[in-house]
Image (cartoon, coloured by chain):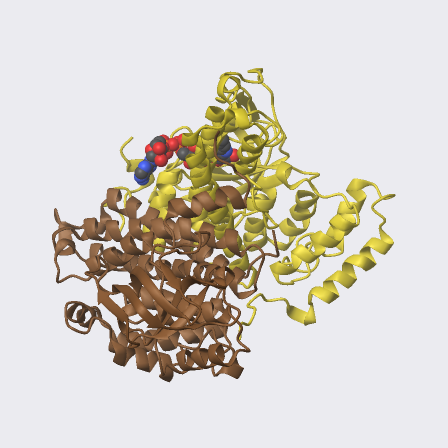
Amino acid sequence: MSATPDLLYSDVEDDLRATVRDVLTDRCPASAVLARCESDEPYDLGLWRTLAAGSGLAGLLVPEKLGGAGASAREAAVVLEELGGAVAPVPFLGSAVLATTALLGCDPQDKRVARLLEDLASGASVGTLAVPLTYGPGVSFPQTVRADADGVLTGTVTSVADAAVADVLLIPATGPEGPGLYALASDTPGVRVAPAVPLDLTRPIADVTLDGARAHRLAGSGPAALEGALLAGAGLLASEQVGVAQWCLDETVRYLGERRQFGRVVGSFQALKHRLADVWLEVVSARAAARAAADALATGSPDAPVAVAVAQAYCSTAAVHAAEECVQLHAGIGMTWEHPAHLHLKRAKSSELALGTPGHHRTRLATLVDLPAAG
Amino acid sequence: MTTKTTATTGRGGLDAEEVRRRVRAFLAEHDPATTDRAAFLRARFDAGLAWVHFPEGLGGLGAPRALQSVVDAELTAAGAPDNDPRRIGIGLGMAAPTILRFGTEEQKARFLRPLWTGEEVWCQLFSEPGAGSDLAGLRTRAVRDGDAWTVDGQKVWTSNAHNARWAILIARTDPDVPKHRGITYFVCDMTAPGVEVRPLRQITGEAEFNEVFLTDVRIPDAHRLGDEGDGWRVAQTTLMNERVAIGGGAVPREGGMIGVAATTWRERPELRTPGLHDRLLRLWVDSEVARLTAERVRQQLAVGAPGPEGSGLKLAFARLNQAVSGLEVELLGEEGLRYHGWEMTRPETVDFFGHDAGYRYLRAKGNSIEGGTSEILRNIVAERVLGLPSEPRIDKDVAWKDLPR
Ligand SMILES: Cc1cc2nc3c(=O)[nH]c(=O)nc-3n(C[C@H](O)[C@H](O)[C@H](O)COP(=O)(O)OP(=O)(O)OC[C@H]3O[C@@H](n4cnc5c(N)ncnc54)[C@H](O)[C@@H]3O)c2cc1C
């Protein structure tokens, strides 16, 4: 195991959080998210432009010489906490995390890779990594897309997050040179992006069909670039889950402190206080786990795979529990469409599957920390 | 872009470098190989290297708490003896911070040095047969008699009373006011006439705790800690420290009970089953996360910003110790049916790792009771951290003597 991770927030990180929170408070109230999620534009691309270009979030993980902020996973994690709390319908995870880290895992000296990174960093284009959202670190390279020697792709990738708004798709495919990442614009002939009806209305998914679509194999790409992106994505998703869980806890505490039944505030009933104390403990624990994962990714620690698996196994469950308690303790109003609790429940539940289930991450730990299965 | 938040510079420009220099200078004068243990520890205290965040003259340097790890690392590397902190946990973790905060100059000078060196062991005379969770309901009486107090009553579950030289004690000095207001805090001499310690055998077979009878025990007023009637407030300092008391140094991965279970799992493939595997992995994750949560609290304390996370640590610790030790007994199969022996011993410390799985399982039951039950800790989290209202109470504004019994 490596050095003790820094589990706190730096002043710079606190400032970043305040900036993001200001924008979200202003532009992304629950009522707006709710109104948008059934409209023709489930993503708020106006908000994304403000965050991406205005606040520089799209290029957080991109080095300064490629037009990014040269920040680390620690800062991206703080942004995700805030985006999670607001269930903001913006393609940060797909574009600024998954696509960006996949490209950083290729050869960034290569002109095409560098240009793609520059465009993502400036917010000029939105990208995503075309793998099913359920894929987590440690899975074998996807086999659903074939490439020929000219980079012409055939196959399908289902349930891709943020694909519906992506200008650029990074597609893991196997060609004559073996497995690699192929980039293409989403309006290339032969590409079809079909949005699915998502359980999580604030993070839409789409099926991508490639029927002789011409792409470019990225220099230096291979299974390691994909694995690196899935590891970063999984580790950072834990921070988004912390944001979701914290919102659920805060809202429930607030509501139970006001709601009266039996002549008292229901938050004074011990049965409920104890349940909220348990949720609170899970949220503070999840925060420590998510910080550890972000720090391990930021410092390139050899312990990152373990830290990420621990954070995912823990934070997924904690967020689902917090969201389920949020609905139950709000009772009737929590069951309505009008109340935003369901947006968080849907985000929490689908994030539990995203980038590997808790069970997947525990199975990975069995190998990583040498606790082999029976038999 | 990332800036580290760990404070490393304190008053008078004391940074890690300066502290390291002082430790080395100290070691140059007191060779651990040739110096007697007690003499070494006393000298270490006098050099301000006992607990660096304490004031100068009281074993510290007035430095940030974070620098203690620098001292400990240097001394460990030099093969220096330590003060066996597990033996004197109540003194270090509870009595010392309370004395530091509320004690007179004389009290601090008298008590802190032998407390830290371990020459004087402390115990805690708080709980009573009728006052456990509802500690403020206690009935042990202290009556003023000139420049001393006469104390009568019974305390219970007193860990280590049989080894202790001193006790922190709370007693009722005014029964005519509501319960929280009529309590005073004392330091009690465990060798004084009228103090009788009787072992209480525990579910482990051993007697780690005791019942303590106090009959006409005289305590000089100079051993009162804080003002008369202010004992509840003083006791809060003790209890806070008891719950937040986290080990001085960081715990490594698998440092706790999970490490024992994991080692057994690795070394004994014949014991493995799929069901136990899943439970082990869940508990491994939970243990690692609890370790990180404690580490985060430690980092917050080191920069002087204790977060509310502290109140929850003990909840997680108790739950995990119980679940992991339960799993371990199951994992061992037939061996789990056996126990090392039920003879009544009188241990000096809680030794989780020097015993078998059955002992761990049984002793861990106390983790959710001692120092505030898990139910009480959940109340504390809900009310003080989350700000939820308390249950309706009937005992707040009534004189203690008029409370229903
Ligand atoms: C191993 C061990 C060592 C100890 N060492 C010491 C020591 O050195 N010095 C010392 O002073 N004490 C010591 N104690 C005592 C310990 O602090 C008390 O046992 C504890 O505070 C609980 O009090 P009680 O046993 O009277 O239980 P009670 O208070 O009678 O509780 C009974 C049950 O009711 C629950 N309960 C009580 N009030 C509430 C409430 N308001 N809401 C919900 N549930 C409630 C409790 O959680 C518990 O489950 C020790 C205990 C143990 C087990």
> Splitting the image into 4 quarters, where does residue B347 fall?
top right
Name the residue nearer the viewer: B130 or B31: B31
Report the residue at 56% width, 54% height from top: A303
> Splitting the image into 4 quarters, where does residue B116 fall?
top right
Name the residue nearer the viewer: B253 or A329: B253
Report the residue at 38% width, 81% height from top: A55
Taking the image as drawn, is residue A250 in sight? yes
In the displayed structure, does residue B164 sit left or right of residue A70?
A: right
Which chain is yellow in the rendering? B
In the displayed structure, does residue B118 sit left or right of residue A239?
A: right
When the figure is inspected, residue B70 is found, relative to residue B395, above or below; the finding is: below
Q: Position of residue B106 (x, y in %)?
A: 65, 51
Taking the image as drawn, is residue B287 in sight? no
**Image hue for chain A:** brown
Report the residue at 56% width, 64% height from top: A299
Q: Position of residue B388 (x, y in %)?
A: 28, 53
In the displayed structure, does residue A35 sit left or right of residue A284?
A: left
Q: Position of residue A155 (x, y in %)?
A: 32, 61
Q: Quadrant of ligand 1?
A: top left
When the figure is inspected, residue B117 is found, relative to residue A105, above or below; the finding is: above
Report the residue at 34% width, 62% height from top: A243
Give the total of numbered labels: 0
Name the residue nearer the viewer: A260 or B334: B334
Name the residue nearer the viewer: B160 or A330: A330
